[in-house]
Image (cartoon, rainbow, N blue to C red):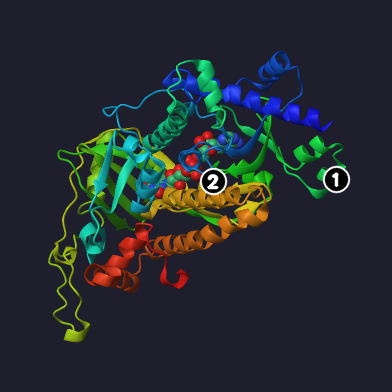
């Protein structure tokens, strides 16, 4: 009996490895590709191994191959302890499988992310940053924040914190594609070490690096319960009953020791695992697009307006990205107004619209007693500057309703949530996907620790270590962002003065400025958390 079980399991493993080998050994553009649907799959099993009704088993099923889900797959593929894990990525997004390449001179996309130095380090560690650098991206070392009342402004310079850059703005499709290229490369490098020339030999070599993309969606999931395991008959049924079983919308079934929900803010995994959330809508939407200006921009600009902030973020060449928060009604208007009117509205919002410029002479601190005089930093000496004038739209416009959402738990037995599936934040400080990348780094390490000691990687006691690591940090960041959102959505005289004082304080007090930069860079926890 046990020999039969062993040979069935072997058959299943061989079959999965054949599929992924085919996946990875084809033409580079199709290295990560669709697997056959379940009927083809079972037919193949029947033909080649003489078994039917077998369902593929994976160590990890990542539901959602967005910027965060693919990062987890790449991160695991890059670590010695986890690179041999078999991973299924489930997402119907054609960008994952169509093999289309992105060219540096393609028109810019409206969806971009500001990534922090901590995220850049993660990408470098995985080996994905070299691919980002082959595409359009823009490092920035300066940032100017001001508000429409004209009372104050803050300029940040990477030098204030002894850094070269404050961050880098990258199109979302570039982040995703770079991680995918890295995943492909890590697998071909592993297989290519031996320079095998034939498909069969590569197949043999690739069996330790099973990564398969299912170009479909998750439709249902059953998680093991004590009763389902004890009701299962033989040993094999018991071991399957102890795994998560996923049903995909094309009818494919698969088993996994761990299901990672990386399926965004409306996560189906979270819902199927019965994990509740806390949160609220902001009654604000963000209009985003890419615009062109006469010269290259190296600074990130953000001005707080009565209805919300507008940001102009460099993305390379003569392009910048606009993220403009406003009421949903205004957003609907700004999305469809004619191009010239929109460009005028943007220039107005970044210049004299709504109120005067702040005085351009920096606050020297002369009026304060000497012991309280600020340690004037290099950027505190910089005067207020106007952002570049926008000349035309360079992409279509999109509008997103904004909300805050936090999952009450990040893990349950055989399930872990990462990225927007676990937390969604206001984009005003560009932290959302960076928080997701923090989750990726933490969960990868926890899985590696589990593999090192031979633990079951879907066990909740192990997964709780990931939750403990990330929940506190994410809640703290969410509280800061929510506080900012609230402080800047009230137009009330005394509060405006306080805000201006906060701007000026942050502008001239070097230690405060250094801490703000380090925290926003993802390299420092808030003092009460360290
Ligand atoms: C206007 C705006 C500006 C932003 N700017 C920044 C910024 O500058 N910096 C920053 O850090 N963050 C920013 N963010 C936040 C950032 O975009 C998100 O945090 C990020 O997209 C989350 O990535 P994710 O992979 O977790 O989820 P998503 O990007 O939502 O990806 C989820 C994936 O799951 C797939 N999926 C969903 N359901 C299923 C299913 N049932 N089966 C299989 N697959 C499924 C989807 O197809 C998708 O590919 C911004 C957000 C907005 C709205």
The residue depicted at 76 percent of the width and 20 percent of the height is 51
Q: Work out whether residue 153 or residue 10 is closer to the camera in this orientation and state it.
A: 10
The residue depicted at 66 percent of the width and 57 percent of the height is 461
Q: Residue 234 falls in which quadrant of the image? A: top right
Q: Does residue 527 sit above or below 475 in this rendering?
A: below
Percent position of residue 325, x then y:
37, 50
| First in residue order: circle 2 vs circle 1 | 1
Queried on whether the Cβ of the residue with tag 2 lies below 8 angstroms from ligand 1, the answer reads yes
The residue depicted at 27 percent of the width and 33 percent of the height is 394
- Tag shown at residue 230: 1
294 with respect to 263 (left or right) = left
Numbered disc total: 2
336 with respect to 505 (left or right) = right
- Mark 2 falls on what kind of element? loop
Which is in the foreground here, disc 2 or disc 1? 1
User: Quick one: label 2, few (<14), some, or many (20+) residues within 10 Å?
Assistant: some
Instruction: Single out the residue that lies furthest toward the front.
Output: 194
209 with respect to 316 (left or right) = right
The N terminus: image quadrant? top right
Percent position of residue 412, x then y:
66, 52
For the question of whether residue 409 can be seen, the reply is no
- Mark 1 falls on what kind of element? helix
Q: Work out whether residue 243 or residue 173 is closer to the camera in this orientation and state it.
A: 243
The residue wearing badge 2 is 265
User: Quick one: label 1, few (<14), some, or many (20+) residues within 10 Å?
Assistant: few
For the question of whether residue 9 can be seen, the reply is yes
Q: Tell me how far mark 2 sits from mark 1, CA to CA.
A: 35 Å
Percent position of residue 21, x then y:
54, 23
Q: Work out whether residue 369 or residue 161 is closer to the camera in this orientation and state it.
A: 161
Say whether marks 2 and 1 touch (CB < 8 Å): no
Percent position of residue 321, x then y:
30, 42
């Amino acid at each position: 009996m046990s020999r039969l079980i062993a040979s069935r399991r072997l058959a299943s493993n061989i079959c999965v490895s054949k599929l992924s080998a085919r996946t990875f050994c084809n033409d580079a553009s199709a290295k990560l590709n669709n697997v056959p649907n379940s009927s083809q799959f079972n037919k193949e099993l029947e033909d080649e191994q003489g078994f039917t009704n077998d369902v593929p088993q994976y160590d990890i099923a990542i539901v959602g191959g967005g910027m965060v889900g693919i990062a987890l797959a790449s991160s695991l593929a890059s670590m010695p302890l986890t690179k041999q894990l078999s991973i299924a990525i489930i997402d119907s997004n054609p960008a994952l499988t169509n093999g289309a390449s992105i060219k540096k001179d393609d028109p810019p996309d409206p969806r971009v992310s500001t990534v922090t130095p901590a995220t850049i380090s993660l990408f470098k560690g995985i080996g994905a940053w070299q691919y980002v650098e082959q595409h359009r991206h823009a490092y920035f070392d300066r940032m100017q924040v001001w508000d429409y009342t004209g009372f104050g402004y803050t300029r940040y310079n990477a030098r204030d914190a002894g850094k070269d850059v404050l961050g880098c703005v990258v199109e979302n499709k570039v982040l995703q594609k770079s991680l995918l290229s890295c995943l492909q490369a890590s697998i071909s490098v592993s297989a290519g070490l031996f320079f095998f020339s034939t498909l069969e030999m590569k197949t043999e070599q690739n069996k330790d690096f099973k990564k398969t993309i299912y170009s479909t969606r998750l439709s249902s999931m059953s998680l093991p319960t004590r009763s389902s395991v004890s009701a299962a008959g033989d040993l094999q049924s018991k071991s399957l009953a102890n795994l998560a079983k996923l049903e995909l919308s094309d009818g494919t079934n698969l088993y996994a020791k761990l299901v990672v929900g990386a399926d965004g803010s409306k996560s189906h995994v979270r819902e199927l695992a019965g994990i509740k959330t806390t949160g609220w809508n902001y009654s604000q939407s963000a209009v985003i697009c890419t615009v062109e200006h006469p010269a290259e921009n190296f600074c990130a600009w953000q001005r707080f307006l009565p209805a919300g902030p507008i940001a102009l973020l460099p993305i390379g060449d003569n392009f910048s990205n606009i993220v403009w928060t406003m009421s949903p009604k205004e957003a609907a208007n700004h999305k469809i107004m004619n191009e010239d009117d929109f460009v005028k509205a943007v220039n107005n919002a970044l210049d004299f619209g709504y109120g005067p410029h702040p005085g351009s002479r920096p606050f020297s601190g002369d009026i304060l007693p000497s012991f309280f005089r600020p340690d004037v930093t290099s950027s505190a000496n910089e005067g207020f500057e106007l952002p570049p004038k926008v000349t035309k739209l360079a992409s279509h416009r999109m509008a997103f309703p904004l909300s805050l959402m936090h999952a009450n738990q990040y893990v349950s037995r055989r399930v872990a949530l990462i990225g927007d599936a676990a937390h969604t934040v206001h984009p005003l400080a560009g932290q959302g996907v960076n928080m997701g990348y923090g989750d990726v780094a933490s969960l990868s390490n926890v899985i590696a620790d589990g593999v090192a000691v031979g633990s079951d990687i879907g066990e909740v006691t192990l997964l709780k270590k990931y939750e403990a690591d990330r929940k506190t940090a994410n809640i703290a960041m969410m509280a800061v962002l929510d506080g900012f959102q609230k402080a800047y959505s009230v137009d009330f005289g005394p509060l405006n003065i306080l805000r201006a004082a906060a701007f000026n304080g942050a502008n001239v007090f070097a230690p405060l400025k250094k801490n703000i930069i380090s925290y926003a860079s993802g390299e420092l926890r808030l003092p009460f958390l360290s």
